[in-house]
Image: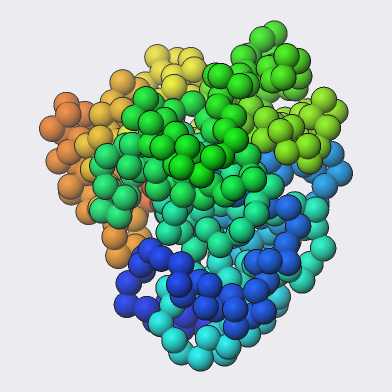
Amino acid sequence: MTSIDKVLDELAALHPKLIDLGLERTFEILSVLGDPHLKLPPVIHIAGTNGKGSTAALLRAIANEAGLKCHVYSSPHLCRFNERIRLADNLISDEALSDLLIEIRDKNAGKPITFFEITTAAAFLAFSRVPADLVILETGLGGLLDSTNVIPNPAATVITPVARDHEHFLGSDIAEIGRQKAGIFKENSPAIISHQTDEARRGITDIAGQKAIDTFWMGDDFNYMAEDGQLVLSIDGEEYKSPMPALRGAHQYGNAALAAATLHITGLVNIKTAMKGIANASWPGRVQQLTSGTLVDITNGNSIWLDGAHNAHGAQALLEAMSAMNKGDNQWSIVVGALNTRPIADFLLQIKPIAKQIIAITIPEQDAALDAIEIKQASENLGIECKTAPTIKEALSLISQEPNLLICGSLYLAGHVLRENGTYPS
């Protein structure tokens, strides 16, 4: 166990619940630390159900193209906790992270505080001490009561597509989930909003109206299209073109347009010259092709596709991305692992059209992992052939001769796969 893991375990033990939504403890620890959240560069605050991480990666790529250095806070991590905090575009070092966590642990003095609250405070403290031009801040869960929702005057707030997820915390009413996500809206800060269902839009509009927020809606105030191998953003009566996103899947076109529109509306970059940065974005575990590594060696030269989609909305985007590849008969042998926090049948139903067979595994070292037997039962109930395997290596061995290989169902599974394959995010 590293010194970082040891401190993280100590911090995790300070509160009996993994998630306990609210802002009081966050404000309290930030006050003890000297309010670092009030000493940051311009902040772009992102909420939504799907696409937050990809949108953050695209924001950073565009900002970098414009010469800006970015701090980024995102979650969860895939392989190492350091992935959650980027300082001026670089993952925080082990030494800096360990020092921060120890400092905050000592100043917290054993008071109850959740793991996410204390690590959010660590990010703000780190950001306040290292020069940068922009902070890209991703919510963890929800918006209104999320620990990141302490920034009083962000440069902009952003809402990615809203759908059902974490229903045991946010409920199943899409309009109410939209209201929770829109809880990050702040007066005098523009809100840039992706395509939404009618129900989600109604909830978001309710909050925007209450707070008199200037809103910019995809489809109304800006839009995009793919044309002649380029992505075209239409906004303010002008068109701006870029190469296609490096991130795979048509759903990434919308994320890229959302990111570009945000930076244009805030005036933080000249989008005409910086939009080409879209082609440089990287976000591991999202329709990622693995072409080498320990696990790929099992597959006799066949590459593996990896995705962290874990709910029905994300699975639909994954289906479209994989279907667009037109590989052979476009039937995929799929390794699935999931958490027990959302209905697995909803996920499986979406990927059924491309599923030749499923190999179910229980995600290792995850208390909330869904048992492989339950995934098998849900698959067979939907008419999908399914076997189980005790490990990811044995799962791949069962389908090593298949040309089309996909692993999906959870970001935690994606992280496990990257570690086992020896291909860590950088």
The quadrant the C terminus occupies is: bottom right
Q: Is residue 376 above or below residue 369?
A: above
Residue placed at 76% from the left, 19% from the top?
240
At which x and y percent is residue 180?
Answer: 40, 48
At which x and y percent is residue 235?
Answer: 69, 20
At which x and y percent is residue 358?
Answer: 29, 35
The chosen color scheme is rainbow
Position of residue 375 in the picture relative to residue 225 (left or right): left
Position of residue 172 in the picture relative to residue 82 (left or right): left
Q: Which quarter of the figure has residue 250? A: top right
Residue placed at 51% from the left, 50% from the top?
184
Q: Which quarter of the figure has residue 283? A: top right
Q: Which quarter of the figure has residue 316? A: top left
At which x and y percent is residue 178?
Answer: 39, 40
Q: Tell how many labels.
A: 0
- Residue 268 shows in the view: yes
Q: Is residue 211 above or below residue 197?
A: below
Residue placed at 15% from the left, 33% from the top?
380
Residue placed at 71% from the left, 33% from the top?
265
Q: Nearer the viewer, residue 111 or 335?
A: 111
- Residue 78 shows in the view: no
Position of residue 23 in the picture relative to residue 54 (left or right): left
* Residue situated furthest top in the rendering: 228
Q: Nearer the viewer, residue 245 or 426?
A: 245
Q: Nearer the viewer, residue 240 or 8?
A: 240
